[in-house]
Image (cartoon, grey):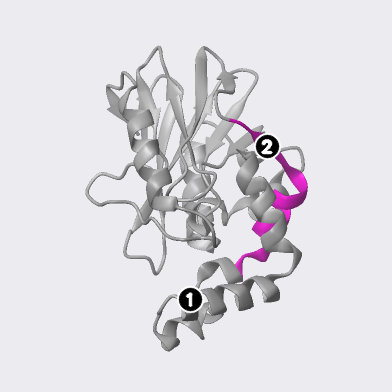
Amino acid sequence: MIKEVFSNIFQIDVPLPHSPLGHLNSYLIKSQEKNLLIDTGLNFPQAFQSLCTGLAEAGTKPRELTEILLTHFHVDHVGLIPRFKEASKNIKLLIHKVEAELSKLRSSDFEDYGEHMENFLKANGAPPSIAMNLQRFHPAFFTPQAYQELASESFPIEDGQEISVGNYNLQVLWTPGHSPGHVCLYEPSLKVLFSGDHLLPTITPHVAQFMEDTDPLTDYLNSLEKIEKLDVKIVL
């Protein structure tokens, strides 16, 4: 399903197979010079086909995308990167610099990453059935190529950076909590916030300890205060 929420800004419904969330909202922003896609979906054929169908309805093809901006590096948002890179080698991948670096760590040795996560979960009281079988059911372990692409091919973005697409100027807002390098995008002329997973319509986003010696809950609460100060009429 596709909806033009503003002129040349399209919301595309991308199914998330085997996920209770059901779907992800991807956003296409078009101009004569750029075609920017915000977030992708899980690496499943039906998800890629649905996104391609939405792009076609908006008058764009995968090879015509110039940039993919990732609000964060969770696999349901980055999983389709390899398929788009196959369609066009020239697509720029934009992601916050924190998660560009974490992608390098994650992609360098998935086996070590899995072992670290298993030990971390055990130490913090997770049931053994989850801790010891993480690599069997967590979709991140089925899409290592997406993190390899982010580690080697991405362009890091920073808090306060401005990204222009046609007449739209998107302000990058670093909002850690749901993930260490999560970003929202704010378009001041429209008073629109692209919230990623920082704000969700009916539930509180998952806030989890990703690495030791971090405090993601405090980060998330601070990020909420940061967003609350904006003049926002619509959250996408």
Q: Is 63 drawn above or below residue 192 in the view shown?
A: below
Q: Nearest the camera: 45 or 188?
A: 188
Magenta span main SS: helix
How far from the left and from the top, in percent, is residue 85?
Answer: 70, 48
The disc placed on residue 220 is none
Q: Amino acid at mark 1?
A: Leu
How far from the left and from the top, in percent, is residue 219?
Answer: 43, 44
Q: Amino acid at mark 2?
A: Pro
Local secondary structure at mark 1: helix
Local secondary structure at mark 2: strand
Q: Nearest the camera: 202 or 5?
A: 202
* Visible residue check, residue 159: yes
The disc placed on residue 121 is 1
Residue shown at 37%/16% (left/top)? 190
Q: Nearest the camera: 24 or 94?
A: 94
Name the residue at the left extreme.
Answer: 202
- Classify mark 1: residues with Cα within 10 Å, few (<14), some (14-19) or many (20+): some
* Visible residue check, residue 65: no
Span of residues in magenta = 142-158
Is label 2 or label 1 in front? 1
Image quarter in which the N terminus is found: top left
Residue with the mark numbered 2 = 156
